[in-house]
Amino acid sequence: MTAHPSSEVNTAVQTAIDACATLPGALLPVLHGIQDSLGYIPAAAVKQVAEALNLSRAEVHGVVTFYHHFRDRPCGRHLVEICRAEACQARGARQLETHARKRLGCNLHETSADGGVTLEPVYCLGLCATGPAVTIDGKLHSRVTPERFDRLLERNA
Ligand code: FES
């Protein structure tokens, strides 16, 4: 969960800008590129992206904060996402989320104290009929009860 050195941030941001700056609506692909590379969008990236795309810092910051997908701080060693959309809610996602928060000792958008797990909400993973749905480091899991959540966490995180 450590921040990257500024030279690494600068290189990752410039690489994303070089790859996407000429695309229509370049801001989102650039931000995705940065997050794919660094795991989050550092504050320094906002200024660099704004200047490269001729946008204000407020515009870039607004997009970063609008989309739940983007993080503004480093992620834990593992990323757990719990689906909060309606079908999963009807199948027990709310109880699962309560269990996960208690088990990890952190809220959504936060990382456990040992830096092991960042807990994020997602809104539909395409497994609506077999929810509650969860991803652990990008791998999909369905029918996740609190007990199954604990087993998955022990195995994967
Ligand atoms: S509602 Fe959760 S996967 Fe679709």
Image (cartoon, grey):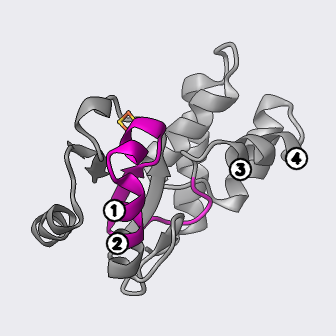
User: Which of marks 2 and 4 precedes in the sequence?
Assistant: 4
The stretch in magenta equals 71-98
Is the CB of the residue bearing disc 3 within 8 angstroms of ligand 1?
A: no
**Distance (Cα) linking label 4 and label 2:** 36 Å
Drawn side of residue 117 relative to residue 32, left or right: left
Q: Nearer the viewer, mark 1 or mark 3?
A: 1
Q: Is residue 97 magenta?
A: yes
Q: Amino acid at mark 1?
A: Leu
**Distance (Cα) linking label 1 and label 3:** 25 Å
Q: Position of residue 106 (x, y in %)?
A: 47, 78
Please name the residue that numbered disc 2 is placed on: 99
Q: Residues within 10 Å of mark 3 (few under 14, many from 20)?
A: few
In the displayed structure, would residue 83 be above or below residue 157?
above
Drawn side of residue 132 relative to residue 106, left or right: left
Residue nearest the observer in this picture, 82 or 30: 82
Query: In what quadrant of the picture does the N terminus appear?
Result: bottom left
Q: Position of residue 149 (x, y in %)?
A: 21, 63
**Distance (Cα) linking label 1 and label 4:** 36 Å
Point out the quarter of the image occupied by ligand 1.
top left
Tag on residue 65?
3
Q: Amino acid at mark 2?
A: His
Question: In which quarter of the view is residue 97 placed?
Answer: bottom left
In the displayed structure, would residue 42 be above or below residue 32?
below
User: Which of marks 3 and 2 precedes in the sequence?
Assistant: 3
Drawn side of residue 130 relative to residue 86, left or right: left
Q: Nearer the viewer, mark 1 or mark 4?
A: 1
Q: Position of residue 70 (x, y in %)?
A: 58, 48
Please name the residue that numbered disc 1 is placed on: 96
**Distance (Cα) linking label 2 and label 3:** 26 Å
User: Which of marks 3 and 1 precedes in the sequence?
Assistant: 3
Identify the element where label 3 is drawn. helix
